[in-house]
Image (spheres, rainbow, N blue to C red):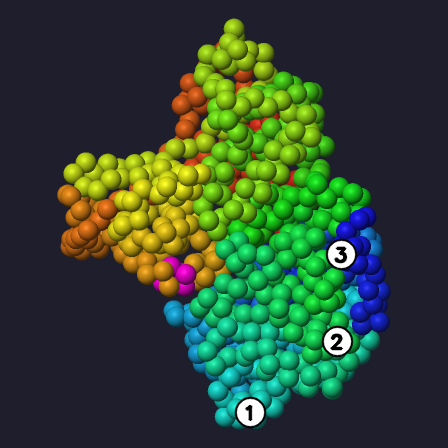
Amino acid sequence: MKNAGIEQLIEPFRIGGLDVRNRVFVPGHTTNFGHANHPTRRHVHYHAERARGGVGLIITEAVRVHPTSAGRHISLGCFDDTSVPAYAAVTEAVHAHGALVFAQLMHAGRQANGDATRTAAWAPMDVPWASGAAIPHAMGPSDIGVVVGAFGEAARRMGGAGFDGVEIHLGHGHLLQQFLSPFTNQRTDRYGGSEENRLRLVREVLERVRERAPDLPLGIRVSADEFLPGGLGPAEVMAAVGVLRAEHPIAYVHVSHSAYHGSSSLATQMADMSFGHAPFRHHAAQFKRAFPDLPVLAVCRLDSLAEAAVLVEEGEADLVGLARPHIADPHLVRKTLDGRAHEIRSCLACNQGCVGRLEASLPISCVVNPEVGAEREWIAVRSAARTPARRVVVVGGGPAGMEAALSARRAGHEVTLVEAGDHLGGQIVRAGSVPGRERLTLMTDELARDIIRAGVTVRTGESVNAADLLPGGRHDGFEGVILATGSLPRRRELPLGPEVFDLWQAIHALSGKDRDTPSALRGTVVIRDDGGDWPAASLTECLAREGAAVHLVTPAAALFPRITTYSRLGLTQRLGALGVKVRPLRTVVDAVGDRVTLKDTLNGDTEELHGVTAIVDAGLPTAADDLYRVLDGHPDAPPVLVVGDANAPRTALEAIYEGRMAGTFLSSAASGAGTLATAGATAVTAH
């Protein structure tokens, strides 16, 4: 292996008296795989797959230590000894593949959603974490004693379950950080006020953990910076770590950042592609300089092993954590060790299948890896679904068509992929041309790479009509047809008003090779947003950065409701700084000259915007399904499946999922999903 940084990254490392086989770890991240707050078979197979993929250490998602932190039954908890066997199944599976596994222990504090348990959240103060959130219960001394005891008992149970160590979560704005921070802790008793008092709860928790689990290595996770006025910064957090380390045998410090607060601070916690690579690496470096003999774990937007290796090579961290990249490809390390790094599927940092589904209380998935959380079930149904090799044609070279072609080829079929344009990628290429969204094209670039390697026949610049697929046509003889013809934008004309662009036209104008943006799009621009998702959002930001005065008009009550809160909080901060004006609960009803009339959807009142030079219609797209309508049910047509936007305009998450389903099973995505759900029933049953 020629890369010195990678070679150093895969060397063994000693932490807490334990030998880790390499310096790569999977940091804790919520999965929503739980049942009655216990791990399930989904957890077992999920973590086992990443251990099999070569990672050195796995840290579990946050294990809630008390029911007041449970939030939902799909989160993990450790409230009594009945949970131990389920956790033991996880540790056994990880150890079987040579990795270590630590349990992360946490109390969420004021943001714990008590709807499922009908309990109040506990916090230092009775201040909600965000506007409109529930008011928490301000903890008294007896409550504090309960939490301290709960941490100790949870650590004892984790030891009994076979975990190699525990990580106490002092960061991300959870309960212990809420007590540490002067922003969230303004108590006047012995747990508030001075730095010593605000640190008291953490010290008591660590002491109790050491008492109840004396043989387990003890790590801590901290937020180096809360990014809040009057909140914790690196100097304060490093001082706290120094105190704790003097009192306890801290095995490592896991350096993160942010607070769970209804502001842009939360957006940094799951930094999306708009942040760029490793935007917070300097935090780990600060801790490594302050504590050179203490192992430092770095995390957040370390997108690849090669990029993460730089932190180890330059002495900024001892171990590097890649959470979302291991969701996208659980075999990152193994492929690199085997000289197959060119086969890795990259994380897009889109926050769509992971964080977006978490917010909807759904199990995590991934745009580029739709098998997340059902790894063993996919293996089983693939074996059961094996069919004789067929000749299959896929029409449409966007993400759904590319994934369908690749999956069908891997299932043993002879596959031809036909694309009318001169290159593969479909709308992803267009979306990835918008500044700040470039990582999207990793998906289609890597699909194109894999398609060629797999032996799919690719024809670009070739249109297909219904006659081509019927007996006697150019593509006669195929035994299966998968239609992935995508969708088309809609444009509502306003003939007497300013020039109207649809989404594709506007994106092309902004991202064309000549970058000669029409002057109309540099003036005062109205964006009509009916979808509330990234297409309109990214275009809004791009236009504003180009110097346009942008008015976003939406019939929705909220701004971009289909974008995860973690990304939306960062997006709205940027749009505010760019001067974007948002007009919710409004629709465009008329335009004359440079005057655009808006209507209030609640009371019907109208208002006018003057000086408008262009309108971008980001209305709902329509499926390009003409070919499907002709072939479906035609007596002479071969079996036809429709996937992606041609099925119904949605996102790349659904397009890739449907493409894999259709290619793997050569049956409808709905049928395939039913098969998989049946086969994976044990994935949601407690161990």
- Kind of element beneath mark 1: loop
Measuring 44% from the left and 53% from the top, which residue is drawn there?
563
Circle 3: residue type:
Gly
Q: Residue at x 80, y 44 (%)?
A: 338
Using the numbered discs, state the Cα–Cα distance from disc 1 to disc 3 in whole angstroms.
Answer: 43 Å
Q: Amino acid at mark 1?
A: Ser
Considering the numbered disc 2 on the image, is that residue within a helix, a strand or a loop?
Answer: loop
Label of residue 194 in the image: 1
Per the rendering, the mark at residue 241 is: none
> Marks 2 and 1, how far apart in space?
28 Å
Local packing at callout 3 (Cα closer than 10 Å; few below 14, some 14-19, many 20+) is some
Binning the other alpha carbons within 10 Å of mark 1 as few (below 14), some (14 to 19) or many (20 upward) gives some
Estimate the spatial distance between the alpha carbons at disc 3 and disc 2, rounded to whole Å: 19 Å
The residue pinned by badge 2 equals 292
- Which residues are the magenta region? 572-576
Q: Is residue 447 left or right of residue 533?
A: right
Report if residue 227 lies within the magenta region.
no
In this rendering, which labeled residue sits more in front, label 1 or label 3?
A: 3
CB under 8 Å between callouts 3 and 2?
no
Question: What is the x, y in percent for residue 619?
Answer: 33, 42
Residue 5, numbered label:
3
Residue 147, how many percent across, how many down? 62, 80
Instruction: Tell me which numbered mark, 3 or 2, is placed earlier along the sequence.
Output: 3
Please report whichever mark, 1 or 3, sits nearer to the chain's N-terminal start.
3
Look at label 2 and name its amino acid. Answer: Pro
Classify mark 3: helix, strand or loop.
helix
Viewer-side label of 2, 1: 2
Which image quadrant for residue 659? top right
For residue 53, above or below residue 116: above
